[in-house]
Image (tube, rainbow, N blue to C red):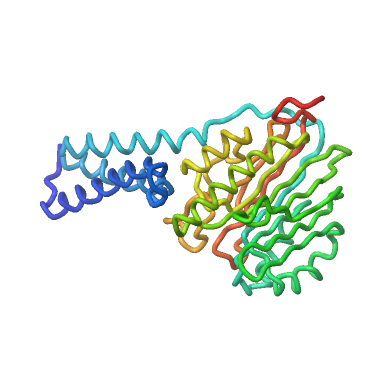
Amino acid sequence: MFIMLPDSLTLLLWLAAGVASLFSLLGFLSQVDWKFELFSHFRTQYALLLCICLLAFLVGGNLPGVLVSLFFLAINLALILPIYRRITRREARMKFYRLFFANILGTNTHYEQLILAIRKTDADTILLVEVRHNHLEQLLPALADYPYQFTQPDVKNFGLAIFSRLPLGSTQALCFDERCTPALVARLIIDETPLTLVGIHPYPPKSRTQAAQRDHQLKLTAEFVRSQPNELMLAGDLNCSSWSHTFQQLLKDSHLLDSRQGIGLQPSWPAGNPLLRIPIDHVLYTPGICIQARKWGQPTGSDHLPVIVDFSIVTTTHAQGGKK
């Protein structure tokens, strides 16, 4: 038996379903114009709204509404659900190590909260972006038990820092060219096995120019990744979500894998608004690495939630076919 819905509610449902459906389609047009990429980030929100509309249309016996909501819900679920598909994880021969990655927000002055969030994870390696001099004044004494450190603070939002208990073979702030922000490249030694860790925070796409700079940097990053002979992890606030064409192109060009695969989306920004959160903080890796777990960290006072990844190196074969 159907329930007769008020005309005003029916109109509201059609408006909600129509907006979610339109935005779902616009999200596929990011290659046409950088502004359309904004619509690609909110797939989970579209799916939730369309699911609510679908249920309401079912209750009201509104067949056209049911069909429209179901069609566009299916489109969004087709993009979301594959991320939850389980993958076969190889048995690791070595113990797991923990990486803590966070965009700590350049204007963040919640130092105690930041330090507590970091210390609680007991990570082997800590990688931070948006690091400024005032952050280091607090972090350096608090993380003195991390003997391997490299810091490159910046007065804007492109400072980098790494703190590690794992030996570092070398570290550098690498700028591919004048259109790119610095990337942190660290060569770690894990059980006598080299691992390259890359941390990046490209420009946010707030304009056509900045969107082009971000895309350019991610393209050069992919080229750099492919040139590396060892296993590699790439962590960063990439300023693009899992459904962005730019992000998908990075995966394709770099041959890296997404640490979310088989675990879930874990959207990390904005930290203070769960309903609007999108996944823009990424940890990617080469196939010779095994991801045991991936989760959020405690809030740090930033507008981003930290990402914690437990991993081990199960082979010494690079994604491009290095030697065993």
Q: Residue at x 81, y 70 (%)?
A: 141
Q: Residue at x 67, y 50 (%)?
A: 176
Kindly tell me whether residue 145 is visible in this rendering: yes
Q: Residue at x 53, y 47 (%)?
A: 215
The answer to whether 50 appears left or right of 79 in the picture is: left
The answer to whether 12 appears left or right of 27 in the picture is: left
Q: Is residue 45 above or below residue 323?
A: below
**Residue 275 coordinates in the image, percent (x, y):** 42, 56
**Residue 234 coordinates in the image, percent (x, y):** 67, 45
Q: Quadrant of residue 219?
A: top right
Which of 205 and 141 lies nearest the eye of the viewer?
205
The answer to whether 258 appears left or right of 99 in the picture is: left
**Residue 138 coordinates in the image, percent (x, y):** 74, 73
Which of 26 and 7 lies nearest the eye of the viewer?
26
Which of 229 and 188 lies nearest the eye of the viewer?
229
Q: Is residue 104 above or below residue 67?
A: below
Q: Is residue 132 above or below residue 37?
A: below
The answer to whether 138 appears left or right of 261 in the picture is: right
Dividing the image into 4 quarters, which one contains the C terminus? top right
Q: Residue furthest front?
A: 178
Kindly tell me whether residue 267 is visible in this rendering: no
Q: Residue furthest right?
A: 192
